[in-house]
Image: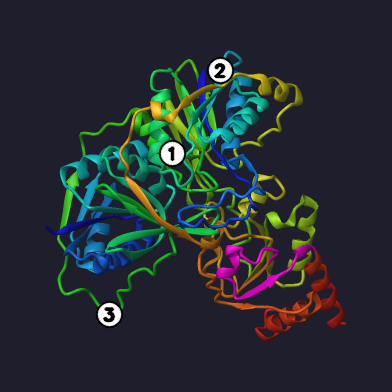
Amino acid sequence: MKLLVCVKQVMESGSILQINDSKKWIDHLASNRFEMNKFDAYAVEEALLIKEQFPESRIDVITVGPDHAQDTLRRALGMGADEGIHLVDNHEGYRPSFLTATWIAAHARDKGYDLILTGIMSEDEMNGQTGPMLAEILSIPCCTGIIRETLSPVKKTVSVEREIEGGARDMFDIKLPCVLTLQTGINSPRYPALSKVLRAKKKELSVIDVSFLEKSKQTLTLKNIQHPEKTRKGILLNGTTEDKVDQLMDILSKKALLQ
Amino acid sequence: MEKKIAIIAEHGNGKVKPITYELYTMAKKIQELEPKKSEIYFFILGQDTEFLAQSISKNTGKNTHSMNIPGGAHYNGSLYKRVLSALFTREKFDTICAPHSTSGMDYAPALAVILKGACITGVEEVRQEEGDIGFVRSLFGQKVSATLMGEVCPLVMTLQPGSFKPHSFKSGSPDKKGKVTIENVVEYSEDKMVFTGTRPSASKGSNLDKADVIVSGGRGIEEEENYQYIEMLAALFPRSATGGSRPICDYGWVKYSKQVGMTGTMVSPKLYIACGISGATQHVEAIRDSKFIVAINTDPDAPIFRIADVCIIEDLIKFIPLFVETFKGRSK
């Protein structure tokens, strides 16, 4: 099996989200750190589990992003992926999924991947579009929100369960090659092993500047970003912890919710 | 030329889902903001959906097109993408509105690619933006909101459930009844992706839907052992149950049967207490119908505080034991 895993580097959760002067993106503060999009870690792990089952498999991991996005590729290599591909885009700001998908497709088109995995969405832009768009550009099937997959390399199919509203699961048999976007909880992503981390540090990555890839038209414009207005419909309790305990107890007693 | 807006209706168990009429409210707002005249059309896909199409057209007075797909009773992404792209290639629309549901999220991005259009997912609001229509959506776990505009036609968008009130039909039926057209889709056989069945939810059999009071824990409990605080608080209330947000189920700290969320159980208790839950849309949508919501969180900007009736900025690990102790002291 030849596998491609699409990962994204995002700001660590809890980072300070200071909107920049142009009101179009977040300031790059020195205190903010970056990490692998949590949703994508499930995709790396799932690929590793497939490789454990089918040891002749090869796992390529790809990312689109600035120079420091290489750290995320090295993290995936440290977890056990085989090769890293960095499509370098140093533009800072909102990057429409269509652009990301077009570039990844340009790399993937003639590589003969059997299965392409990615997270259900990114933590920063939260679009959930890159996987489905990538599949459509490559004219292969896509299934989103996968909570379980079973590969049949002989039949060249994958049986999947996708989570739907209320937690029920729809089951499908899909012909390979295809794209799957994975739901959280499908597995427990491992920590990189020290020996692999050392190897990953030295490993040469394939680095391609996106300006050499096919141009795609601009489909979207981001006008501005802002912090949402604080629309608190309820009341905020003030005072010490003890005061708040008393206030909450009074509120619940008055509403006869607590006797 | 008149602008055209398409709404793809969502249905299940023989009923039109409320998001369909939330989409209608949003589409009417687009009409108000749009300087050019525009018209709204409904589309419904599936098997034997004619009676649903009738009810949509009766309720809205809008033309409704029912696409009958034999064997298409269940959602199949591959099939939907083919049927919808053929439809919207034949008949051009400026805006195609779909629900931000597990199916809408699955087909909308691909549909935009096939139609060479733009795609905006998870829309929460529409607003006038320099003479054009801007679509507002969340980024960075709802800590930032962005206004986006499509630069190419059509724009395929998905609407976050709960963002608009479903259109109310209390004022009676519209003056005119819309036309219902039925199309039998026969030429599509799908072999790349075959639906093989549905497995019931893990939340079946949990007592979450019957409880008067639900206390739920989220990532803010920090460690599996700290779930005891959630149980400790719930124990104060009769007819109570404990729940959890998606992440703590993913971590394996509690069973998936306890998951409160769109992919778990939708709840509507008399009292819901969210402890250390930030308030991702997936969770908030599932608790929206609770009569009274109390939220305890250390982050003053947590989105959960936008819908809570009582907001408490505290660490649950400190707050809950003190609350329990004080309560027990009082009732002596």
Which residue is tagged 3? B171
Please tell me in which quadrant of the rendered image residue A106 appears.
top left
Crowding at label 1, few (<14), some or many (≥20) Cα neighbours within 10 Å?
Answer: many
What's under tag 3, amino acid-wise?
A: Ser
Please tell me in which quadrant of the rendered image residue B238 appears.
bottom right
Which label was assigned to residue B231? none
Q: How many marks can you see?
A: 3
Q: Mark 3 and mark 1 in contact? Answer it, CB < 8 Å.
A: no
Q: Is residue B305 left or right of residue A248?
A: left
Q: Is residue A106 left or right of residue B246?
A: left
Which label was assigned to residue A130? 1
Based on the picture, tell me whether residue B307 belongs to the magenta stretch. Answer: yes
Instruction: Tell me the SS state at disc 1.
Output: helix
Looking at the image, which residue sits at the far front?
A21
Q: Which residues are magenta?
A: B297-317
Closest to the observer, A23 or B280 = A23
Indicate the position of residue B96 as horizontal and vertical percent values: 28, 52
Do the dots labelled 3 and 2 sit on one chain?
A: no
Crowding at label 3, few (<14), some or many (≥20) Cα neighbours within 10 Å?
Answer: few
Crowding at label 2, few (<14), some or many (≥20) Cα neighbours within 10 Å?
Answer: some
Looking at the image, which residue sits at the far top?
A56
